[in-house]
Image (spheres, helix red, strand yellow):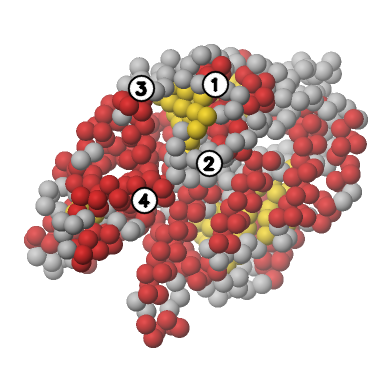
């Protein structure tokens, strides 16, 4: 994402995005800056470079990751914990991860402490049970987040607090919570208790939440940086996020277009196609973004990890010299003759799935690696092989209908391909409304007081995750004999939270099952059964996505879920590009492709970088070897 030397053979045609001014890394007038956007757009890199630039300018800076799948440690090459820690070589910069589990432990103790020795042991156990759920994890993380904004003893230590946030859907929920909890506390019965335990655990922090709402909405205090790639999907997501944040009162926004490739090599079809795709995405910008000041960060020929690379990015220099012309061939060819041949195309994966028993196919991975595209291509490939398929997403920012486009696969026309493809999307707000209505209908015979307590409890923001989990379980149940269910999951951290909730539900059910355990099938049991569920890990052939996918795989294995295999998406290796910058990026793929094929994946499939945008059923069908039938 740094600028690079322009060779003499560069095309004179420059995409319109090149007119965007370069980012001024140390120019952040507000004390709080949030970097948000679709997964995989480079939020962590951009936030890290800004933090280093501010610290080098003499500011005291705290960089906080609110992403459950944070990779701040990889970015800076140092251990990052739940409390601020220094970054070697960058005086004035501290970094920390907001760890939801540790935050939950501290929150529980703060609430439970005053009751120890005051209430009976049985009453204390009841309170502990109320605080044992996933809801407590969410509110504890939120509580720690508001401390960083509202506590003078924390804020006063730093000139700037920068937040590297989770992908958009998760971040919007986090930023909505101060208002949601303030409203809940004000409208709930003081004698009641929420799913988080005693109401006092929230009410005692009410002033902190009010202050957080004020800070977030004050343009002199908070800047929201909408980070995007120059790609239509990422820009559309940034526009949606900007509109929702504006509705929350967060109006001081900036757009950062990251990874701009503005000077393709003349005559190079791959480079020209990439630049043309970016140009098409940027012209015109979505309406919401046209009102937002915009800056750009150029595409880099190197992996951007470590303080020296972040300083090079800030200074507009390449982190390493681009590989030019034929010199790249020597670095790429050895891999092309080796492990890459052990990674067949996506067509082979769909053939293998189609030949087996129908069931669930979970597509998991870091945000921005192409999970939605891979899931849609698999779904269409299975349909073309004669199977009935339901395609869905658990990602709050997922848009499978937009990927499918407007041909016969489009969901708005009803089931496509003779009724064999159906599409849905788990929408958290809709699932919460459905869950709340069903709970109230089931409780219609309750007395007025008990019904009032239930209504109060259901107004708690924590029930959103419960409702989403229920919908996810319903998706797994739809995978019956004769039907595949392909699920595009939320980015890694959010998916792991969902799996944690699935595990908690499994333990709760099995603990009370007694002698009927053999007749019970929980969602976790379905996920663990390779005959019912195939889990596919999707990654890009780059250092950070592969490393994060490896961590995700270990987390899945700890939950007793063994991935079926990996899909490596958008590989430049073998594309034939002669562009020096793109060949440098292709050369960087070699070690990551070998790592996936030889060390991490039991089996792996490779999808090359595509010159055409992968939208529309016909183009997706072509990825799985049925292009002739797709028309």
Name the residue furthest front. Answer: 117
Label 2 residue SS? loop
Distance Cα–Cα, label 2 vs label 1: 22 Å
Label 1 residue SS? loop
Distance Cα–Cα, label 4 vs label 3: 26 Å
Q: Residue 91 has which mark? A: 1
Q: Which residue is mark 2?
A: 70
Distance Cα–Cα, label 1 vs label 3: 17 Å
Name which quarter of the figure residue 52 lies in.
Answer: top right
Distance Cα–Cα, label 2 vs label 3: 25 Å
Q: Which residue is mark 4?
A: 105
Label 4 residue SS? helix
- Side (left or right) of 291 relative to 576: left
Mark 2 or mark 3: which comes first in sequence? 2
Q: Residue 156 has which mark? A: 3
In the rendered image, the vertical position of residue 360 relative to residue 60, given as above or below: below
Mark 4 or mark 3: which comes first in sequence? 4
Label 3 residue SS? loop
Residue placed most toward the observer, 309 or 356: 309
């Amino acid at each position: 994402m740094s600028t690079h030397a322009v060779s003499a053979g560069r095309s004179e045609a420059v995409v319109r995005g090149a007119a965007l001014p370069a980012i001024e890394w140390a120019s952040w007038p507000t004390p709080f800056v949030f970097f948000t956007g679709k997964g995989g757009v480079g939020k962590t890199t951009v936030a890290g470079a800004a933090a280093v630039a501010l610290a080098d300018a003499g500011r005291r800076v705290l960089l906080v990751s609110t992403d459950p799948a944070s990779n701040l440690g990889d970015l800076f090459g140092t251990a990052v914990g739940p409390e601020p820690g220094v970054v070697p070589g960058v005086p004035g910069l501290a970094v920390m991860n907001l760890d939801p589990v540790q935050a939950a432990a501290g929150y529980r103790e703060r609430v439970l402490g005053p009751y120890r020795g005051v209430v009976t042991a049985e009453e204390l156990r009841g309170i502990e049970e109320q605080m044992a759920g996933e809801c407590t994890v969410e509110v504890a993380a939120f509580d720690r987040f508001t401390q960083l904004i509202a506590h003078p003893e924390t804020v006063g230590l730093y000139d700037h607090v920068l937040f590297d946030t989770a992908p958009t859907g998760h971040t919007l929920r986090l930023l909505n919570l101060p208002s949601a909890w303030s409203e809940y506390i004000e409208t709930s019965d003081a004698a009641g208790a929420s799913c988080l335990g005693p109401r006092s655990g929230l009410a005692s922090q009410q002033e902190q939440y009010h202050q957080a709402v004020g800070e977030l909405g004050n343009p002199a205090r908070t800047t929201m940086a909408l980070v995007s790639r120059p790609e239509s999907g990422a820009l559309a997501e940034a526009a949606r996020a900007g509109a929702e944040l504006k509705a929350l009162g967060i109006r001081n926004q900036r757009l950062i277009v990251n990874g701009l490739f503005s000077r393709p090599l003349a005559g190079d079809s791959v480079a020209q196609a990439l630049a043309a795709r970016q140009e098409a995405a940027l012209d015109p910008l979505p309406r919401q973004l046209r009102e937002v000041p915009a800056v750009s960060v150029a595409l880099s020929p190197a992996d951007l990890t470590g303080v020296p690379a972040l300083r090079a990015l800030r200074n507009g220099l390449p982190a390493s010299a681009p590989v030019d012309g034929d010199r790249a061939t020597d670095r790429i060819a050895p891999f092309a003759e080796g492990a890459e041949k052990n990674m067949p195309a996506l067509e082979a994966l769909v053939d293998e799935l189609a030949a087996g028993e129908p069931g669930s196919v979970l597509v998991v991975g870091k945000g921005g690696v192409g999970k939605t595209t891979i899931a849609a291509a698999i779904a269409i490939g299975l349909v073309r092989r004669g199977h009935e398929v339901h395609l869905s997403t658990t990602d709050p920012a997922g848009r499978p209908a937009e990927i499918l486009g407007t041909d016969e696969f489009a969901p708005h026309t009803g089931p496509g391909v003779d009724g064999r493809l159906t599409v849905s999307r788990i929408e958290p707000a809709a699932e919460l409304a459905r869950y709340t209505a069903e709970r109230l209908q089931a409780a219609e015979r309750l007395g007025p007081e008990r019904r009032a307590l239930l209504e109060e409890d259901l107004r708690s923001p924590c029930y959103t995750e419960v409702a989403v989990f229920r919908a996810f379980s319903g998706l797994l149940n739809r995978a019956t004999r004769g039907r595949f269910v392909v699920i595009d999951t939320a980015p890694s951290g959010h998916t792991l939270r969902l799996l944690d909730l699935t595990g908690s539900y499994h333990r709760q059910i099995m603990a009370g099952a007694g002698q009927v355990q053999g007749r019970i099938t929980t969602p976790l049991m379905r996920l663990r059964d390779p005959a019912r569920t195939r889990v596919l890990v999707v990654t890009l052939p780059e250092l950070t996505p592969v490393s994060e996918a490896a961590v995700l795989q270990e987390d899945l294995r700890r939950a007793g879920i063994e991935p079926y295999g990996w899909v490596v998406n958008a590989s430049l290796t073998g594309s034939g590009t002669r562009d020096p910058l793109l060949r440098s990026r292709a050369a960087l793929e070699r070690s990551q492709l070998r790592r996936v094929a030889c060390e991490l994946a039991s089996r792996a499939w490779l999808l090359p970088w595509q010159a055409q945008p992968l939208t529309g059923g016909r183009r997706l069908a072509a990825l799985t070897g049925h292009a002739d039938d797709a028309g």
